[in-house]
Image (cartoon, rainbow, N blue to C red):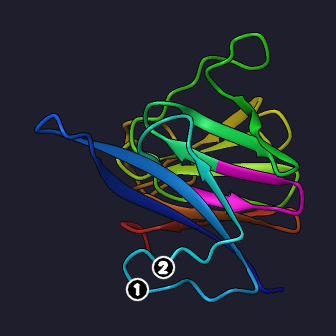
């Protein structure tokens, strides 16, 4: 499809000798993103509720971001102001990332890699419930239980496929 989502960062001048940084997600459904200053031809614009989002992934019904301060945030596409986050202790465990890098989803599960921690975390794709971790945190290695700098991971059929950058 032509439905594309882009994560953007822009500085807003506050007039008080400082700048305010705004993290937004834009949806371009059939439009080509404008490269001109002030050329905002997006179909939908959303300001992220937590700062420093690392990645965003959209499924048919969800928009998912991972960030250092807010953990995992799963937005409902019908109302982007409605979301679940791993910071809400009544729906999941309190979970903050140290070094989130790769984010992928197969629609039912969400994977987040943390290369500096040497792990891949798995979450439920609907409400962000933590499901488990592959690798041993802060212990790099090259055997079957360790990882060494995993940059990205996906689930293919029944297999977890990991781009483990320092292991071949």
Quadrant of the image for the N terminus?
A: bottom right
Question: Which of the two residues, 129 or 11, is positioned nearer the viewer here?
Answer: 11
What number is the disc on residue 36?
A: 1
Give how far across and how far down residue 100 sits, in percent: 46, 47
**Residue that badge 2 annotates:** 39
Q: Residues within 10 Å of mark 1 (few under 14, many from 20)?
A: few
Residue stretch rendered in magenta on the structure: 54-64
What number is the disc on residue 119?
A: none
Task: Using the rendered image of the protein, determine whether residue 103 is visible from the camera's viewpoint.
Answer: no
- Badge 1 vs badge 2, beta-carbon distance below 8 Å: yes
108 horizontally vs 38: left or right = right
Q: Is residue 15 magenta?
A: no
Give how far across and how far down residue 18 sits, in percent: 16, 39
Residue at 26 percent across and 40 percent down: it is: 14
Cα gap from disc 1 to disc 2, whole angstroms: 5 Å
Residue at 70 percent across and 35 percent down: it is: 132
Q: Residues within 10 Å of mark 2 (few under 14, many from 20)?
A: few
């Amino acid at each position: 499809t032509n439905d594309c989502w882009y994560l953007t960062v822009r500085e807003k001048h506050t007039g008080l000798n400082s700048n305010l940084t705004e993290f937004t997600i834009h949806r371009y459904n059939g439009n080509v993103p404008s490269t001109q200053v002030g050329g905002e031809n997006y179909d939908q614009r959303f300001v992220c509720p937590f700062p420093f989002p690392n990645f965003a992934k959209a499924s048919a019904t969800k928009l998912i971001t991972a960030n250092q301060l807010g953990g995992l945030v799963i937005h409902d596409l019908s109302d982007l102001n409605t979301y679940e986050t791993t910071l809400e202790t009544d729906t999941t465990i309190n979970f903050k990332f140290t070094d989130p890098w790769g984010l992928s989803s197969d629609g039912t599960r969400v994977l987040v890699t943390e290369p500096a921690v040497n792990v891949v975390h798995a979450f439920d794709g609907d409400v962000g419930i933590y499901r488990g971790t592959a690798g041993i945190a802060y212990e790099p290695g090259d055997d079957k239980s360790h990882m060494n700098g995993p940059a990205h991971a996906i689930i293919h059929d029944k297999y977890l496929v990991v781009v483990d950058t320092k292991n071949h």
